[in-house]
Amino acid sequence: QVQLVESGGGLVQSGGSLRLSCAASGSTFSSYAMGWFRQAPGKEREFVAAINWNGRYTYYTDSMKGRFTISRDNTKNTMYLQVNSMKPEDTAVYYCAARRTYGDARDTLVRSNSYDYWGRGTQVTVSS
């Protein structure tokens, strides 16, 4: 079984930056596609970004393109989300997810039900 643990969240001022991490344990990380989702208070969970097993393909929500960068280091079993120019509307719990089986097309990885494993989330709060 795969366990995912997010870290790097916290309080940041508007305009600042954060780098979130997702560490995988209990299995081999390198074959999995990975994704980031977030959920703000009173809202549904939404797709943020995804990356295929070797980092060749990355996908983003259009509104987040340019401020968000997803990456991974398979030698460390870790995925990252760099967020720049943060806004109060970025305040949310951020979750990482892993897809066990083959399939790394955009229309697959933007769907939350495409993933097999989920972390517990890390809180990100952006002050105005």
Image: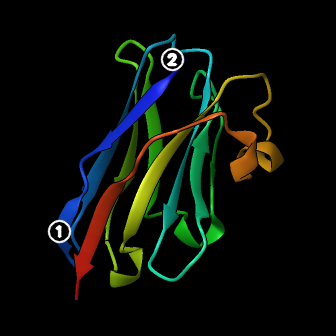
Left or right for 50, reference 17: right
Left or right for 41, reference 125: right
Quarter of the figure with residue 12: bottom left
Assign a secondary structure to mark 2. loop
Q: Nearer the viewer, residue 82 or 8?
A: 8
Kind of residue at badge 2 = Phe
Examine the rendered structure and indicate whether residue 41 appears above or below residue 80: below
On the image, numbered disc 2 is attached to which residue? 29
Marking on residue 1:
none
Q: Position of residue 67 (x, y in %)?
A: 43, 64
Examine the rendered structure and indicate whether residue 39 appears above or below residue 33: below
| Quadrant holding the C terminus | bottom left
Q: For the residues marked 1 and 2, what is the alpha-carbon distance in whole angstroms? A: 29 Å
On the image, numbered disc 1 is attached to which residue? 11
**Residue at the spot x=29%, y=65% of the render?**
124
**Residue at the far bottom in the pictured view:** 128
**Residue at the spot x=41%, y=82% of the render?**
89
